Amino acid sequence: MVKKTIVDALSSGPQTLTITSLKPSFLLSLCVNLKRKENEMDATMTTIATYTDIFEAEMAKSLLEEAGFEVVLLNERMMSMYPSMAGDMYMMELQVQQDAEAEASDFLKNLDDAYITSEILKKEGALLEGHFSLTSGKHSDRYIEKIKVLQNPEATHTMCKRLAARLEEYDFDTVIGPAYGGIVLAFDVARIMGKKFVFCQRKDGEMSFRTGFDLSKSEKSRSDRRYPFHRWQHQ
């Protein structure tokens, strides 16, 4: 009876529900019942994409809705409440009306990195407009306040995954990030790609590595003379 009440409550709409002292077997059964409940909601919908990252799933849903599609995101509540348990069992399913399947799928496929990044910057309030004096001495009417993105780990991870995908064709073993804003981005890209990570910081007007980093095992950076250290040390 308790399980049925919880499933009905979660399926009825967005809300906050606190569950304590429940056995893993109960939660596993709860996931199964919620999945069954969601599948019974509307047989006219069809899945066009699946996600394990709730930020990406919600962004795709939002963009489709802005484009005029009727969208449903299955398993969203369970993923937000129990990400590790629900993630092992199900993926979030992005569904649209069956007669809009082809058009909605094409819409998602045509979302390039520039568009997704721009949407993330706008959503996080990081794309500023006005008059800005840059550290280079130049002036700009736009400025990206990266801190506003970095304080949202999910948004940052989404951007880093796309950056990592762009770097897959290159052969390297270490990702370097300039302090301080570049540290988080470089670290996550390195983690995603299975590479080493170091960061550099400005000292006496030049970028240098912090004492303690060992680059002796970064064979590609030492062997590839097209990119000697003195060229990018000043960047």
Image (spheres, rainbow, N blue to C red):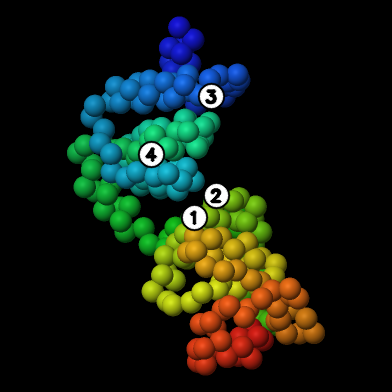
Q: Secondary structure at mark 1?
A: helix
Question: Gap between marks 2 and 1, in whole Å?
Answer: 6 Å
The mark nearer the N terminus, 1 or 4, is 4
Q: Residues within 10 Å of mark 4 (few under 14, many from 20)?
A: some
Reading the image, the residue beneath label 2 is 154
Q: Residue at x 53, y 55 (%)?
A: 157
Q: Amino acid at mark 2?
A: Glu
Q: Is residue 41 above or below residue 166?
A: above
- Looking at this view, name the residue that lies furthest to the right: 204
Q: Secondary structure at mark 4?
A: loop
**For this rendering, which residue is in front, 70 or 76?**
76
Q: Amino acid at mark 1?
A: Thr
Q: Which numbered circle lies on residue 15?
A: 3
Q: Residue at x 66, y 59 (%)?
A: 147
Q: Position of residue 178 (x, y in %)?
A: 66, 73
Q: Position of residue 62 (x, y in %)?
A: 43, 44
The answer to the question of whether label 4 and label 2 lie on touching residues, with beta carbons closer than 8 A, is: no
Q: Which numbered circle lies on residue 91?
A: 4
Question: Is 134 displayed left or right of 100 in the figure?
Answer: right
Reading the image, the residue beneath label 1 is 158
Q: Residue at x 44, y 58 (%)?
A: 116
Quarter in which the N terminus is drawn: top left
Would residue 10 be visible to someone looking at this image?
no
The answer to the question of whether label 4 and label 3 lie on touching residues, with beta carbons closer than 8 A, is: no
